[in-house]
Image (cartoon, grey):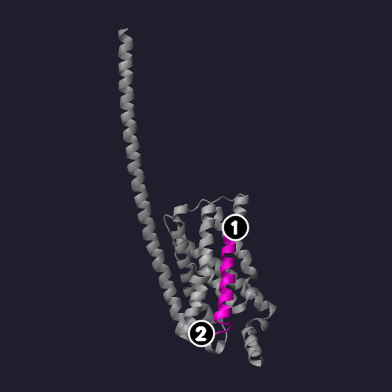
Amino acid sequence: SSAASDVYKRQNMNQSDISKFQWITINLMVAVLFAGLELATQKLSVPPLELTLVRPGGGVALIAVYIWGWRALYGLAAMIIGIAYYKLTDIIGSDITPTLIIAILLFSSTLLIRLTIGYWLLKRYVGLNNSLTSIRKILIFILCAGPISGIIPALTGGMGAIFISYLAPEDYLYSAMVWLVGSTMGVLIVMPLMLAFFAKPRKIWRKRIVTLAVPMLILDSMLFFTIKEAVSIERTRFETEFISETSITHQKINRQFNEYNQVATLLGDVLYSESAIY
């Protein structure tokens, strides 16, 4: 009983010893980091479905919940709704309609579902304030924070995209798979950085800033620019093909129009000749 009590106190230590000013700072930091990553990775969407290959914003939110608890997400809640509104108005329009409101609530709830499932899994199977010194715990952490907690949001997110007519039903499974992979990649990208800089026990995680966080930050930067360049090439190829197909279609329409015009002219000449005879 005493040992269990000590574990509980140690797990909740990171929340009880934080002042109100620190909580405000943490909320602002998480919200700004989430918004910045969401807007930055929006440029990494791949045509023609405009699906994002990496979603680190959700990873930031989940790791923040794991480190500081739900109190770290007060500011993030408003930011989630704001980002959803910003993205959806480009698709639906800026007019406040029932469709827009439902879509905002639907897409916002997908992240909250993931946070709820992910936090529960991490707390139960990894434990709070875990130093992750074993390969087994690291793998469990990645599985719980990545694919397992991301399955339901990936499925509901695809349904939301179909609801706003952004996604065709036949592309639903592909979209859900890309969503799941992007969410898992997002966790893998931000997890080492946030844990090294903010997780407890600090005595252990502080040592990993140089050995883990800095190299990971360099790799993340390289990955971002690599994906950005690949997306740019793919977008250029898609636009070129689209222009080419449009030009071919335009030529076909012009050719058919000219043929119809010739037939109409011929018929007009015949009718005019017959009327002149009579």
Whether residue 122 appears in magenta in the rendering, the answer is yes
> In the displayed image of the protein, which residue is found farthest to the bottom?
2
Residue segment shown in magenta: 103-131
Residue 236 location in percent, x, y?
A: 37, 56
Residue 104: numbered disc: 1
Q: Position of residue 216 (x, y in %)?
A: 44, 78
Q: Main secondary structure of the magenta part?
A: helix
Task: Say whether residue 64 is visible.
Answer: no
Q: Is residue 215 left or right of residue 261?
A: right
Looking at the image, which residue is at 59% across and 73% down?
A: 29
Q: Callout 1: 10 Å neighbours few (<14), some, many (20+)?
A: many
Quarter assignment of residue 266: top left
Instruction: Work out whether residue 33 or residue 67 is closer to the camera in this orientation and state it.
Output: 67
Q: The C terminus appears in which quarter of the rendering?
A: top left
Q: What whole-number distance in Å separates the C-alpha atoms at marks 2 and 1?
A: 36 Å
The amino acid type, in three-letter code, at marker 1 is Ile
**Residue sitting farthest toward the top:** 278
Residue at position x 49%, y 76% from top?
Answer: 142
- On the image, the x and y values in percent for residue 211 come to 45, 85
Residue 100's spot in the image, x, y percent?
Answer: 60, 53
Q: In the rendered image of this protein, does residue 173 appear above or below residue 28?
A: above
N-terminal of the pair, mark 2 or mark 1, is 1
**Residue at numbered disc 2:** 132
- Disc number at residue 36? none
| Rendered residue at 58%/67% (across/down) | 113
Q: Amino acid at mark 2?
A: Leu
Front residue (pair 42, 121): 121
Q: Secondary structure at mark 2?
A: loop
Residue 42 is one of the magenta-drawn residues:
no
Q: Are marks 2 and 1 in contact (CB under 8 Å)?
A: no
Q: Is residue 208 left or right of residue 95?
A: left
Q: Which image quarter: residue 160?
A: bottom right
